[in-house]
Amino acid sequence: MRIGQALQQARALGVARLDAQGLLTHLLGRPREWLLAHDEEVLTTPQAAELHRLLARRAAGVPLAYLVGEREFHGLMLQVTPAVLVPRPETEVLVEWALERLAEMPCADVVDLGTGSGAIAMALKQAGPAAAIAASDRCARALAVARGNALTHGLDIEFAQGDWWAPWKGRRFDLAVANPPYVAGDDPHLSALVHEPRGALTPEGDGLAALRCIIDGAPEHLRPGAWVLLEHGHDQAEAVRTRLEQRGFTSARTRPDLAGLPRCTGAAWSGAK
Ligand code: GLN
């Protein structure tokens, strides 16, 4: 089978051209530019069989990132497995905001709660190497992925296992960031995300339980002047801001994601409580 035919086969299966090229790139170990110029190149029989298997899984909805085992986030190529959520571009909004905080306080103590693949923690350490970055996740398999990524990129990050603030008893930070599960338990779009860990997508119920837990525990773990920055659902900004204000945070504000949806809310801790 030639590359051109492989791409036709992908189309027949309903796999997007870019995804099919991504699978071929992975399979052949060649960049996309090479593929484009080698339509006539012939795949070996085992390569063609493996491609067919991958295309069928992609057609069944398995994220491309799991099939190729990696996904780029904020310029870093990260290993991903089905134990972690696939890093999403909207989360770069949270990273950019956190980097603005780090620009004002380069040596900040930062914590990333529910780090998953380690995407946020690593993007921050890479762009703000003077900061001390801590990251936690309740899931041992996710932490193993994050640790592997940190090792690959030579980024010094302190990892710990546990739910939200649990691993950080007695510790205080200058910046806390999180992209917790926030999809409501009955949200119909969860059915399109069945290949990702459900616990990383939804805390069930109205989708706010993890956000509430992080906000409620934050004052005990923040220094005066610290900020907390949280990713949330497009319809949760008001609930998150209200909770932050009730808990004594000030300057609460929300930023949109790349699609213009309110996606990230942050607030400052004055230390008054
Ligand atoms: N933004 C993701 C989605 O809607 C959800 C990520 C999350 O729950 N943290 O697919």
Image: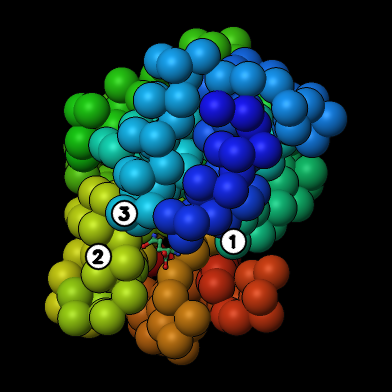
The colour scheme used here is rainbow
Q: Residues within 10 Å of mark 1 (few under 14, many from 20)?
A: some
* Residue identified by numbered label 1: 90
Q: Is mark 1 within 8 Å of ligand 1?
A: yes
Q: Foreground residue, 80 or 108?
A: 80
In-image side of 272 versus 7 (left or right): left
Determine whether the residue tagged by mark 1 lies in a helix, strand or loop: loop
* Residue identified by numbered label 2: 202
In-image side of 123 versus 66 (left or right): right
In-image side of 132 versus 81 (left or right): right
Q: CA distance from mark 1 to mark 2?
A: 17 Å
Say above or below: 93 vs 139: below
Query: Considering the image in quadrants, where does the N terminus appear?
Result: top right
Q: Is mark 2 within 8 Å of ligand 1?
A: yes
* Residue identified by numbered label 3: 60
Q: CA distance from mark 3 to mark 1?
A: 24 Å
The answer to whether residue 229 of the structure is visible from this angle is: yes
